Structure formats: C-alpha cells, structure tokens
Image (cartoon, rainbow, N blue to C red):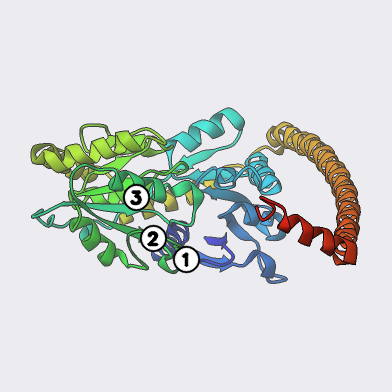
Amino acid sequence: MRVCFLAGELGRSGGAATIRSYADGLRERGFQVDLVDPGAVPAGVEPYDVAIATWWPTALELWAVPARRRALFLQSVESRFYEERHYFERLAAEEVLALPVAFVTVAGWIRELLAELRPDAPCDVVRGGVDKEVFERPHTPRSGPLRVLVEGQPSMWFKGVHEALGAVRAMAEPAEVTVVAGQPEDAGEVAARVVGGLDADGMARLYADHDVVVKLSRVESLGLAPIEAAHAGTPAVVTPYTGHDEHVVHGRNGLVVGFDDEPGTARALDRLARDPGLLERLSDGARESARDWPSHADAAEAFAAAVQGIAERPPPDAEGALAPLARASRRRLELTREHARQDAWFRHAFADATEHIEELNHALGELRAILAAKDRQIEEIRSERAYRAAVRVRRLLPGGDR
C-alpha cells in the first residue's frame, strides 16, 4: 500500500516526532511511505492509496495530491493554539474539520467533539505510544528538597510554564526546579535551569531524577510527558487540560489543580514535599497506570490498522461535509465583515485622534510663542535704565533686600 504524509518541515516538536514514528512504523509493516512537502508535490506521480494531512495548512493541500482516499491526522483541535488576535489562522484551522476526509486522532475527547461536528466522518483514535524499554526504569531516591520538573516550551503562551515556576516560588517548603523545553534556545527569560533537545533516553533519565512533573497547560491534546514520566514512577501535577483525564487520576497517580491557581498549586507541591508517603503512593499509582498504556509497537500497529481501514472503506460522503463547509464559509464571511467594520471604526477613531492631537500641538505651539514673546518683553523691561534704577532704590529702602 502506498501512503503519503503531507508534512512540510518536520521540526523538533512532539507532534513532528509522532509523524516520523508512524511513518517508520508503516514502513516496518510493508507500507510504501513518502513524506511530501505540500508545496512540492511531484507531477505525474501515481495515485497514493491514502494521503494523510498532518497540520491544518497541509489539509488545504490534500486535493493537490493524487490519492484514492484522504485523511487528516488530527493531533489536536489546532485553532486553540492561536490567541484571539490570530483571527484568520483560527478560522482556517477550524474549517479543516469540515473537509470530506477520514480522521485519525490521538485522544478520545477529540473523537467525541468530531462526533458532534461531523457525525458522518469516520474517526479512529490512536493513542501515542511510549517506548517501554527506555522509559521504564528505577526512580532516583530523594535525598533533599522536592525535585520539580516543569515541562513545556516557555515561549508558548498556552504551556503555563511561567505559572508553574510562580507556584514553585510560592512554596513554603524548599524545592529545586528544572524546566525541560523542546527548544531551550528560544525559552526567553526564565528564572530557572532550562534543559532540552534531549533524546528519549535523556528524557527518561530526567523523569527518573525528579520527584514530580508539573504541567499547567491551557491547551493540550493528550499531554504525553506525564505519561512518559509515570513509567519511571514520577507522578504529575496538572491542570485539567483536555486529555489529562485519559491518564491522570487525582489522588491515584497525580494531582489535578485549577487553572490560574498559584496558591493551590503551591499547596499541592508542599503536600508532596512534606508527605513522603503520599509521594510514594502516587509514584506506585503512576507505575501501575503506565502498565496499561500502549507501547510504541502497539501505537504503530493501531495506526497501521487505521490507515488500512481508511483505504478499504468507502470514502466519506461529500454530501455530509457540505453543510459544515457551508456553515464554516458563512461564519468566516460574517466574521470577516465584522472584522472589517471594527477595523474601519478603529481607523476612523485613530484618524480623529490624530487630527485632535495635531490641533492640540498647534495650540501648544501658539501658547509657547506667546510665552516666548512675554519673556522677551520682560527681558526688555529689565534691561531699561529706569527699571534698573528703581531696583536700586528699592534695595535702599528698609526691608528692600528681602
């Protein structure tokens, strides 16, 4: 079977590593796999059995690739990665959910969402696997302050790294904190030790050398770091981001704290620092829950089965996608019009403010000219002989020198 991934540039992110892993897994199982740059689809290529988009911009290029079946590997609801000011990116990322394709995703909550938005579209869930031989290892015993590992890229607004560091600083008990980031060179100003660019073995050692992983993300698809850490017996403190409940059970293998709750997070960490028994129970629970998590081989097998099913099933009915596509198109048009109206209002308000500022500056210039003229008149008066004589007489009078 011939499969292509529309992948573009594959960096060092966890999502890119997952794509490479599944491409290798398909090859190991006899699939012919190409990683194709969406902007460089070769002409005259034989149709693929399945073409798989991996990110919303690549989904828009799916029909530029000759293929019998088309799918979207959805590692998250990608519009949520953008802040509100990224208006057009959010709209475009949402619209790809209305395409007439099959979906493969990484978490049950995404399948539930798609079932509401696109009940006509087939969707398989393939949870990201963990290399058990690498991540299952003894935990380094604690012999001092609580060792806290904050996971996430500090420069990404939704990862909550700075909030996590604030909670560690607010602890009453002593703690040592390390931040692990995918791109430590782009971490920015971080008041902590930052490491990153680690291979699987390096990450496994880092998990085993810490007592707790802290992940206070606002946006996640699943959150693989707490799952990997659990294989080394390291529990997690997490916010209730989407996907956390597929692994973290409060009080069993980790603790769940609220969003924007620095005092509550600090208290949770202080509990772990003060109560070795609690930390040990959560560590045991983490190892126990990790046993049921799929391995790399399990995930690769499930992904291959999903791709095989997409190739064998009839393609999704385009009719089922027309209504969502029409709604998405109408919504984009309405929001674009509203955006244009707001833009026009702000431009008009800015022009009015600029004109008013220019009038005030002109009036200020006139006042300065009047004051300068008055100053010159005063200097002229002070320079006259009669004025100087009057000043000398006044000084001769009793009390005149005051």
Amino acid marked by disc 2: Ala
Asked whether the beta carbons under mark 2 and mark 1 sit within 8 Å of each other, the answer is yes
Estimate the x, y position of residue 292 in percent, counting from the top left. 24, 42
Residue 135 visible somewhere in the drawing = yes
Q: Nearer the viewer, mark 2 or mark 1?
A: 1
Q: CA distance from mark 1 to mark 3?
A: 17 Å
Q: Secondary structure at mark 1?
A: helix
Q: Secondary structure at mark 3?
A: helix
Task: Rate crowding at label 2 as few (under 14), some (14 to 19) or many (20 or more) other CA atoms within 10 Å.
Answer: many
Residue drawn where x is 47% and y is 41% of the image: 124
Q: Earlier in the sequence, mark 3 or mark 2?
A: 3
Residue 316 image-quadrant placement: top right
Residue placed at 65% from the left, 55% from the top? 57
* Up/down of 274 relative to 231, above or below: above
Question: To which residue does mark 2 refer?
Answer: 181
Position of 223 compared to 266: left or right?
right
Q: Which mark is residue 186?
A: 1
Nearest the viewer among 172 and 165 is 172
Question: Which callout, 3 or 2, points to the residue nearer the camera?
Answer: 3
- Amino acid, disc 1: Asp
- Three-letter amino acid code of the residue under disc 3: Leu
